Image: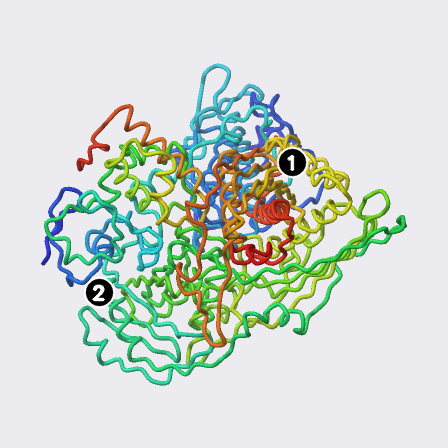
């Protein structure tokens, strides 16, 4: 720690930058500023360690925390609320380190004019990146405030306490944060180390604080970009082609132009949009345009029943991402299997929406994108504008589970707004637009072979996974749907794999289990017959499904209990803890076999870097119909330091239910020309009638440990546990997702 | 002009009679809680009550709504003074993104008024036209059950279906 004397502080402040921002020197900070010091552990760190979390990319404290002279605290994050409750958790972190009630904190989320650039809100990174940055920034701001108070009171900092937004001396004198800061900003570069609160003294972090956004959402308060109403706002709809690759050969705009309320029809190549005064007028006009539009369609899609063979025979870039060789006892038995996962969609309940305003050569886009900065770059490129003239502001949309159509709607709104200057334009996609055009989660194939030795242990593991890319996000303009449809189109960027350790198609392809010999190969397939991108958990859903099914098959072959078998191959103590906890909650050891019922177990640590999660479930398989009913599920999760345990439970419960829906029902369907899963009738998902009787989630808290992202941790283990339970119930192993009643019925030979 | 009765208030609306109620609520009357999900009556996000029955507002033209009572989520309470079901959803933290929730609450409200002694199985049946993509189902079921039990133990205006 810096032992610079406090007395140097105020007089040594220097104006180093313009704009009135005052640089407050870190010499204000003293080694022991607060009474809580006893409860704090100064995180000693080696020099030159990168700054914590996203501070490494944006090191100025006032980029994260600002306090005005009235004592109002504003916290800035480059991450966005996607329905995962991140706002509440980030507020809790800041409130904790600043020793204020959460009601004192205002949080500003992703906005290219106001917040740090934290890339995409994706990959379960928000708590690790932004949560960690805010925690350290808040702690360091707290240290500066205490330093200012010590200076003001002329006392040693040791006796100071921080409480309810004020720093108080032992003699009762207090100064509010606003008073201490005055009109200055804490424009200070973060340091490598922070004096953090001792987790044992936490009053806000670790508590299931109710989410700040829920009261408004359940009472009809404005909550989403869909609810944004700007003065003079008009409504637009886009006429999308009927199929990928379709070319607009004729369009009669005369009829639509005469419809009530129609303001403008915009056509640029295959991009057609209509703007009207009222929203339903825009819908009506779009439908009128659809009736007159003549499209030349081409059969660009592969045969659906050939899709897995096509993936396997497509040119691929092969990378061995694990290659371990050790002496091992002779194999006594070798098994192999192939697993398949279809194209699946995000299917947000609210179709994509955006509002844009082009005024004075500047463009503002209100959007539910996951990445305001990358979207700004894409829109600027598409419109050939300098990026500085484009501002993207995040507003919530309906649930976001990866790269859905949010960015595309932002691109649509930008194009339309530029054609209609000075008027805010709101564009919302129709249900069919979303189902037909959102980028899907890619179809994948895995092949695995493994050997058991005479002790019933896995001595050799060979795993191959074939996949398209899992990220076709903007940045590049060509990744916006509208940009691809212009008369002078932008081509999509060349697909790239996401490198390990996070991985894309190979995310979680490396098992966390320890095998003496193991080889894992990622076959990256660049050719994309369907539009694909990031769907929650990316390749981890498929890889964990495959690994956990095959582990189960091996356990059966070895005559071992599924949980014991996993524990025998697992060294990681935290992994072992979640497995044991899930088994305990499920009461795995007291299972009584029943006809038509089965139990399944699965585990993974998301990305081998994030939260640990284990899921056990019980299913009932209706013999006559093949219908699978999930009776109950029990899960355990270790997300490191738990900031909001109920938020973690909510994410895991939701992940289990969503993964059950994917795994039981969902696949995108298509013929040679068109996507045919165009609405909920043609793309069924889980309904209330199929929801388990109960889901229990046990959170293992790890006070003081780094935050581990939770939002995608349950999907893979749930799919594995479900498949294993079906195998247990029926004696038949299903290796192709989803496990529809029709497929199960065929498999069990009814 | 068509006059609609929305949450107990007469509202004059200048819209084509074929316009679905959803668009009139959102665009003309500037009510946020009724949500566009599919426009096809497949997901339930747009559900409101008409004369005490849950209906899909996305496929109900305003031409059939003269002299009928329309009730939306805004008619049940506010974030400061939430209605019984709204309170239960807050207490159970029964939402992730929350987009689908008002529609479910409106159908649950119709159930609460008609059959306050509904069982858990009735609740599942009642909510089956509704989709939730975040997977908040377990909490939603708990919240509706909680509200129904509360209504039975202490009948209020909520259970009697009066507009606030």
Residue A277 falls left or right of residue A39:
left
**Chain for disc number 2:** A
- Residue furthest to the top in view is A171
Q: Earlier in the sequence, mark 2 or mark 1?
A: 2
Q: Position of residue B105 (x, y in %)?
A: 31, 41
In front of the other: B154 or A500: B154
The residue tagged with tag 1: helix, strand or loop? helix
The answer to whether A659 is drawn above or below residue B147 in the figure is: below
In front of the other: label 2 or label 1?
1
Q: Position of residue A309 (x, y in %)?
A: 64, 70
Instruction: Name the residue rendered at 27%, 69% in the picture.
Output: A275
Residue A710 falls left or right of residue A180:
right
In front of the other: A601 or A87: A601
CA gap between label 2 and label 1 equals: 56 Å
Q: Position of residue A527 (x, y in %)?
A: 60, 73
Q: In the picture, which quadrant includes the C terminus of chain A? A: bottom right
**Chain for disc number 1:** A
- Check residue A277 in the rendering and tell me which mark sits there, or answer none: 2
Q: In the picture, which quadrant includes the N terminus of chain A? A: top right
Q: Which residue is mark 1?
A: A578
Residue B146 falls left or right of residue A127:
left
């Amino acid at each position: 720690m810096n032992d610079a004397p406090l007395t140097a502080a105020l007089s040594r402040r220097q104006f180093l930058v313009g704009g009135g921002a005052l640089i407050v020197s870190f010499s204000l900070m003293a080694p022991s500023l607060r009474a809580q010091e006893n409860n704090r552990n100064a995180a000693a760190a080696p020099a030159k360690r990168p700054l914590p979390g996203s501070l490494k990319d944006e090191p100025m404290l006032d980029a994260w925390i600002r306090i005005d002279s009235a004592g109002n605290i504003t916290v800035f994050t480059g991450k966005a609320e996607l329905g995962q409750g991140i706002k509440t958790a980030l507020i809790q972190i800041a409130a904790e380190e600043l020793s204020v009630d959460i009601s004192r904190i205002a949080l500003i989320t992703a906005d290219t004019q106001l917040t740090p650039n934290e890339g995409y809100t994706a990959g379960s990174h928000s708590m690790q990146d932004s949560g960690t940055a805010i925690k350290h920034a808040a702690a360091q701001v707290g240290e500066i405030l205490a330093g200012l108070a010590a200076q003001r009171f002329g006392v040693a900092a040791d006796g100071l306490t921080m409480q309810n937004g004020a720093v108080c001396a032992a003699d009762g004198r207090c100064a509010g944060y606003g008073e201490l800061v005055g009109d200055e900003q804490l424009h200070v570069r973060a340091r490598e180390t922070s004096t953090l609160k001792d987790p044992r003294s936490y009053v806000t972090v670790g508590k299931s604080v109710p989410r700040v956004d829920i009261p408004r959402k359940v009472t009809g308060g404005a909550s989403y970009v869909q609810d944004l109403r700007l003065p003079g706002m008009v409504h637009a709809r886009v006429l999308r082609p009927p199929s990928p690759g379709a070319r607009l050969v004729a369009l009669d705009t005369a009829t639509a132009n005469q419809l009530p309320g129609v303001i403008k029809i915009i056509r640029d190549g295959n991009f057609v949009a209509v703007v009207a005064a009222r929203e339903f007028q825009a819908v009506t006009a779009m439908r009128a345009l659809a009736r007159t539009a003549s499209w030349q369609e081409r059969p660009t899609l592969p045969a659906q029943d050939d899709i897995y063979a096509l993936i396997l025979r497509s040119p691929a870039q092969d990378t061995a991402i694990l290659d371990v060789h050790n002496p091992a006892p002779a194999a006594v038995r070798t098994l192999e299997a192939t697993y398949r996962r279809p194209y699946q969609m995000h299917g947000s309940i609210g179709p994509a929406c955006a509002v844009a305003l082009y005024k004075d050569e500047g463009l503002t886009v209100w959007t539910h994108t996951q990445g305001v900065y990358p979207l700004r770059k894409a829109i600027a490129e598409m419109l050939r504008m300098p990026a500085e003239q484009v501002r993207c502001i995040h507003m919530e949309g309906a649930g976001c589970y990866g790269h859905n159509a949010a960015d595309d709607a932002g691109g649509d709104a930008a194009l339309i707004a530029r054609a209609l200057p000075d008027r805010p334009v709101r564009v919302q996609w129709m249900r069919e637009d979303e189902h037909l055009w959102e980028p899907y989660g890619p179809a994948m194939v895995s092949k695995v072979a493994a050997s058991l030795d005479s002790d019933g242990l896995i001595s050799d593991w060979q795993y191959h996974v074939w996949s398209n890319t899992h990220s076709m996000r903007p940045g590049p303009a060509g990744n916006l749907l509208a940009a691809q449809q212009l008369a002078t189109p932008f081509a999509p960027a060349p697909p790239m794999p996401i490198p390990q350790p996070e991985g894309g198609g190979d995310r979680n392809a490396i098992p966390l289990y320890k095998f003496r010999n193991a080889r894992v190969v990622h076959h990256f397939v660049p050719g994309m017959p369907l539009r694909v991108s990031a769907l929650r958990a990316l390749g981890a859903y498929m890889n964990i499904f495959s690994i956990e099914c095959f582990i189960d098959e091996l356990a059966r072959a070895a005559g071992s209990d599924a949980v014991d078998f996993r524990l025998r191959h697992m060294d990681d103590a935290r992994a072992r803890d979640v497995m044991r906890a899930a088994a305990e909650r499920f009461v795995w050891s007291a299972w009584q076999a029943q006809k038509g019922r089965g139990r399944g177990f699965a585990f993974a640590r998301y990305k081998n870097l994030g939260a640990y999660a284990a899921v056990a479930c019980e299913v009932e398989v209706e013999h006559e119909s093949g219908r699978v009913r999930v009776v109950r599920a029990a899960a355990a999760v270790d997300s490191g330091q738990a900031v909001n345990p109920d938020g973690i439970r909510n994410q895991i419960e939701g992940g289990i239910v969503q993964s059950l829906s994917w795994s039981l029902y969902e696949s995108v369907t298509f013929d040679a020309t068109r996507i045919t899963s165009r609405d909920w009738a043609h793309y069924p998902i889980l309904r209330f009638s199929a929801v388990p009787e109960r889901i229990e989630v046990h959170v293992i808290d790890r006070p003081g440990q780094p935050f581990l992202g939770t939002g995608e941790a349950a999907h893979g283990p749930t799919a594995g546990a479900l498949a294993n339970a079906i195998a247990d119930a029926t004696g038949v192993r299903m290796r192709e997702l989803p496990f529809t009643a029709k497929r199960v019925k065929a498999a069990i030979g009814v | 002009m068509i006059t609609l009765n929305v949450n107990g208030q007469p509202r004059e609306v200048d819209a084509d009679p074929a316009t679905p109620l959803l668009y009139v609520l959102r665009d003309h009357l500037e009510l946020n809680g009724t949500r566009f999900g599919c426009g096809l009556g497949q997901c339930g996000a747009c559900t409101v009550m008409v004369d005490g029955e849950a209906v899909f507002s996305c496929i109900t033209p305003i031409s059939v709504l003269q002299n009928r009572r329309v009730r939306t989520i805004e008619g049940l309470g506010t974030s400061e003074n939430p209605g019984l079901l709204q309170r239960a959803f807050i207490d159970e933290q029964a939402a992730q993104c929350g987009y689908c929730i008002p529609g479910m609450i409106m159908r649950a409200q119709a159930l609460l008024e008609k059959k306050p002694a509904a069982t858990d199985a009735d609740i599942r049946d009642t909510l089956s036209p509704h989709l939730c993509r975040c997977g908040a189902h377990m909490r939603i079921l708990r919240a509706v059950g909680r509200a129904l039990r509360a209504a039975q133990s202490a009948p209020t205006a909520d259970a009697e279906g009066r507009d606030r």
